[in-house]
Image (cartoon, rainbow, N blue to C red):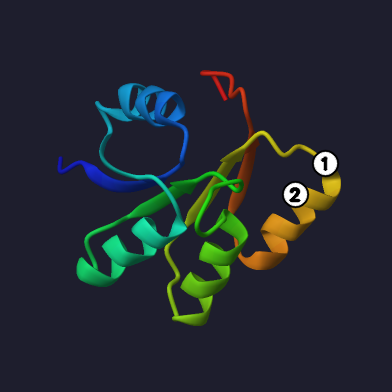
Amino acid sequence: MEKKRLLLVDDDQVARELIEEFMQYDCDCIPTQNGVEGFSYLERNPGQIDLIVMDLVMPVMDGFELIRQLRESGSTLPILLVTARETLADKERGFTAGADDYMVKPVEVEE
């Protein structure tokens, strides 16, 4: 069975490495450091990604703006937010922007 390709968008190197390590048996992870890098990768590699896992708080382009640009461009890729922002307002904003799921850091491995 072919591995899924996951685009990981997070400015925290430790978080990227932990997610990559955890997902390595199920997914090929493509790490990027911010929304601009993530969006650029998707533009250069259409149809190559199966899932986006992203943080919300990043320099250059945050996760909310990246979601907005992706959805405005017609992307229907599933988006999982993994972020330290845990308020109900943040979650509502994430889902309203177009995220498919939301997890709060630190993430429990079982979750």
Dot 2: element: helix
Residue 68, x across and y down, in percent: 57, 71
Which quadrant of the figure contains the C terminus?
A: top right
Three-letter amino acid code of the residue under disc 2: Lys
Relative placement, left or right, of 63 versus 75 is right
Q: x%, y% of residue 42?
A: 30, 65
Residue 46 is at least partly visible in this image: no
- What amino acid is at disc 1? Thr
Q: Which residue is mark 1?
A: 87
Task: Kindly identify which residue carries mark 2.
Answer: 91
Asked whether disc 2 touches disc 1, contact meaning CB atoms under 8 Å apart, the reply is yes
- Classify residue 28 as left or right of residue 14: left
In the displayed structure, would residue 37 be above or below residue 110? below
Residue located 75% across and 59% down the image: 93
Q: Position of residue 82 (x, y in %)?
A: 57, 39
At a point 41% along the width and 61% down the height, the residue shown is 36
Q: Kindly indicate the quadrant of the structure image that contains residue 64.
A: bottom right
**Residue 89 in view in this figure:** yes
Q: Quadrant of residue 31?
A: top left
Q: Residue furthest bottom?
A: 73
User: Does residue 82 appear to the left or right of 42 in the view shown?
Assistant: right
Q: Residue at x 32, y 22 (%)?
A: 21
Q: Secondary structure at mark 1?
A: loop
Numbered label tally? 2
Q: Is residue 28 above or below residue 50?
A: above
